Image (spheres, rainbow, N blue to C red):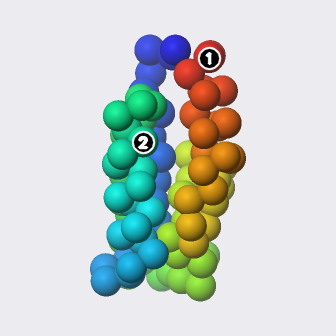
Amino acid sequence: MSNEQITLQVFSRPNCQLCGELIEELSHWQQRYCFRLKIIDITDDKELTAKYAGRIPVLTSGDIELCEYYLDSEHVREFLERIEKN
């Protein structure tokens, strides 16, 4: 596994049920995979709101979009395992 811990970002907004569910699922994944989870509230950022408002939650790693609305377990697992191998 790489010495540098990866950061996953969840683009979210307050009172978003899907966002809460995705974040909760990912918090359980942190027991298995080594990553930081950064929650980004799009509410007060016009650019982020324009980009993500109709699709939240959106999970990214840097510029890579991993999934939107729901956790794509297979895709995210493959991504994290590939990162661990490097």
Quarter holding the C terminus is top right
- How far apart are labels 2 and 1 at the CA level? 17 Å
Q: Secondary structure at mark 2?
A: helix
- x and y percent of residue 11 in the render? 47, 66
Establish if 32 lies above or below 72.
above
- Residue at horizontal 60 percent and vertical 50 percent from the top: 73
Please indicate whether residue 30 sits to the left or right of residue 62 in the image: left
Q: Amino acid at mark 2?
A: Trp
Outermost residue on the left side: it is: 14
What residue does disc 1 label? 85
Query: Would you identify the image quadrant in which residue 3 lies?
Result: top left
Query: Would you identify the image quadrant in which residue 41 lies?
Result: bottom left
What residue does disc 2 label? 29
Marked residue nearer the N-terminal end (2 or 1): 2
Establish if 23 lies above or below 3.
below
Does any portion of residue 48 appear in the rendered image? Answer: no
- x and y percent of residue 74 in the render? 67, 46
Asked if the residue under mark 1 is in contact with the one under mark 2, i.e. CB atoms within 8 Å, the reply is no
Q: Nearer the viewer, mark 2 or mark 1?
A: 2
- x and y percent of residue 77 in the render? 60, 39
Q: Nearer the viewer, residue 29 or 46?
A: 29
Does any portion of residue 34 appear in the rendered image? Answer: yes
Label 1 neighbour load within 10 Å: few <14, some 14-19, many 20+: few
Please indicate whether residue 23 sits to the left or right of residue 11 in the image: left
- Residue at horizontal 31 percent and vertical 83 percent from the top: 15
- Residue at horizontal 35 percent and vertical 34 percent from the top: 31
Label 2 neighbour load within 10 Å: few <14, some 14-19, many 20+: some
Q: Amino acid at mark 1?
A: Lys
- x and y percent of residue 82 in the render? 66, 27
